[in-house]
Amino acid sequence: MIVPPDLVLVLIKVLLATAAIVLLWRVLVRPVPYWGHERPGDLPTDLQEAERRADSLLKDILNEEEFQQLTRQGYLEVRSPSLPQRVYRVPRHQGVVKVYEKDRLIMYLCVQPVKFLPSGDVVAMHKLSIEGNEDQYLKLANRWYSSPNALGAGMGVWGGRRRDPPA
Amino acid sequence: MAQLRIMSSRGDKTVTWDAEKIDLGDPEAVAAVREAERIFNEERARGATAFKVEPGKPAERLDNFDKTVEQTVIVPRIAGG
């Protein structure tokens, strides 16, 4: 089959125009570092300074032991105010919160601020919300249970939105 | 010195006031505490939650502004991810 030279030229022009548009898009529109739903206008121009400030707030909120745990182990353990055997493990950087009861992983939680916050503030957000507003925190969280018998019979391995085990 | 710290995308914004000077009617301290109260109410109306933070104690939720609290931290609205 012989392809007319005009068609080849048109195809090359279309490809070049597409590449130029993609390149311009990547240059002009800032990539979103954390969440897909974040509007670029919400992001700080100086992310490093925002992180520095957030870390300073976090240091004020955490005690020395908690800060060391976060630095060395990459997570912060927050004790449940309502269930003595329950511990929430908050990651230093983005990720799900793991919930342990008697040292056994029972559940994953996904909770995030509705607008962008530096990572230090996100850790502080989890700690304050768990300690001071645990009911609401759990109500809002999306939960994934870790195993069929994690919280008793009938739970099932499950991932989804705010579904509690059957009573 | 008491302070209100509001989390934001740029790191926290802080409003500081001297509770003792408020009792003495110091205009600067009174203006600062009024500003803090205004921000507190405005942020709460937007769905944010305020917490009283004290060293060595678990955080406590604050439903009303309390100028005597040493450190109040405002966390923006959260949602399931």
Image (cartoon, rainbow, N blue to C red):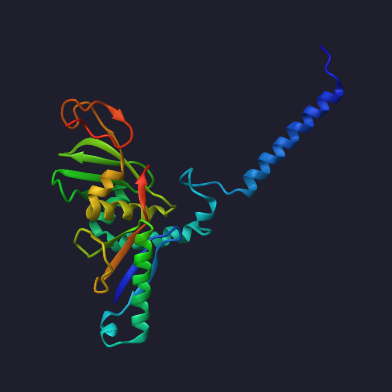
Residue A77 visible to the viewer = no
Q: Residue at x 40, y 63 (%)?
A: B12
Image coordinates of residue B43 in percent, x first then y, are 37, 62
Q: Residue at x 47, y 61 (%)?
A: A49
- Height in image: A131 above or below A95? below
Image coordinates of residue B34 in percent, x first then y, are 35, 76
Identity of the residue furthest to the left in this view: A84
- Height in image: A12 above or below A20? above
Identity of the residue furthest to the top in this view: A1
Left or right placement of residue A22 versus residue A47 in this view: right
Q: Name the quarter where the N terminus of chain A is drawn.
A: top right
Q: Name the quarter where the C terminus of chain A is drawn.
A: top left
Q: Residue at x 14, y 46 (%)?
A: A83
Identity of the residue furthest to the right in this view: A5
Left or right placement of residue A47 versus residue A65 in this view: right
- Height in image: A153 above or below A90? above
Residue closer to the observer: A145 or B65: B65
Q: In which quarter of the image is residue A86?
A: top left
Residue closer to the observer: B22 or A102: B22
Image coordinates of residue A87 in percent, x first then y, are 20, 45
Residue closer to the observer: A63 or A167: A167
Left or right placement of residue B70 versus residue B9 in this view: left
Image coordinates of residue B52 in percent, x first then y, are 25, 64
